[in-house]
Image: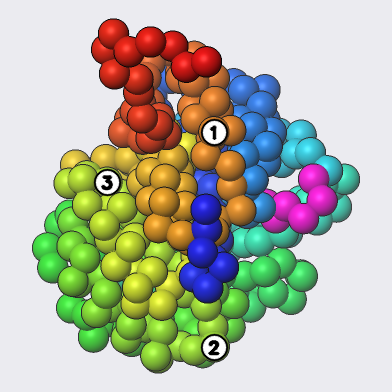
Amino acid sequence: MSDPAAAAVSIVEVAPRDGLQNESGFVETGNKLQLIDHLIGMGARRIEVASFVNPRRVPQMADAEAVIAGLPAAFGVRFIGLCLNERGVDRAIATLAAARPLDEAGCVLVATDSFGIINQGQRIEDGIAANSAMLKKAAAAGLYAQVTISAAFGCPYEGAVPEDRVVELAARMAAAGAREIALADTIGVAVPAQVAALTARVIATIAPIPIRLHFHDTRGLAPANAWAGYQAGCRTFDSALGGLGGCPFAPGAAGNVGTEELLYMFEKSGVATGYDLHSALAANVWFAGVMGRPLPSRAGKAGDFAPRPLPGAPPAL
């Protein structure tokens, strides 16, 4: 049972976007919408549903507008669209005329020149200027405008990223009007001590603007990194049902930390999440059927912890 004295966390479910963007086989729009329904049933209250990108570069997101048009009218649930450029923000704003519009525009600033050029065609300084304009435009339209600093813990092309640089980028995005700033371990290279140090510094720099953490589980450290971030003061985390994910432009990146992993870790540690683990495990089984294979999440495979009867023991009366 959760300890009421422990600070609760909020988990942003990213399976419909970050979880699926690297899949080679196209997941039909109807299945994406069913996935979103399952996520809401699990307890998700912030869901990243689509990315406004060129479908030639990320074919899985070619139906972004169709997914948004089919979103359910779910009270208390906020839907997020990822925007990599100003055209993406314009597409997010266009949904505001729909019956069920987006609530948030998630922008992205890459922490290195090399990965920024590969991912978005821009160096860091270009990204700062572009994101500042994007945040302003999204906010003026009424969207909750937030930004993720990608490759904050390491770059696939440049290696280690200086901590001071990430802190400075967070400060500049805060000054540009970001309502929330996420730090992303895009390729899964972070370790808990690194996460704790950088999280604490960014919180101290941008408070009261909230921080969010986004981990990929390439080296099996994502849950430990999330716990380190929690202890350093972060209270919002991204995850994907089943541990799906990866980045088409980040060689070697594995999937996101599994939602089941975070639910198991936090709930067993007395930290409330607002989700139901058993519903998440059932959703994992359903979506594994859609994908035609078991999903990567270890907790999704192992399930919840429950003692088993001793072999040969008589049945309980």
Seen from the viewer's position, the closer of residues 128 and 270 is 270
Q: Quadrant of residue 87?
A: bottom right
Q: Amino acid at mark 1?
A: His
Q: Say which residue label 3 marks.
A: 217
Q: Residue at x 40, y 91 (%)?
A: 205
Q: Check the image and report above or below for 298 versus 267.
A: above
Q: Does residue 63 appear in the picture of this structure?
A: no
Q: Amino acid at mark 3?
A: Asp
With 244 as the anchor, is 37 left or right in this view?
right
Task: Tell me residue 175's x, y (percent).
Answer: 51, 89
Q: Say which residue label 1 marks.
A: 278
Question: How far is the residue under mark 1 from the one under mark 2?
Answer: 34 Å
Q: Residue at x 35, y 23 (%)?
A: 308
Question: How far is the residue under mark 3 from the one under mark 1?
Answer: 22 Å
Give the mark nearer the N terminus: 3 vs 1. Answer: 3
Provide the residue span drawn in magenta: 74-79
Q: Residue at x 54, y 33 (%)?
A: 278
Q: Say which residue label 2 marks.
A: 208
Q: Residue at x 49, y 21 (%)?
A: 285
Residue mark closest to the camera, 1 vs 2: 1
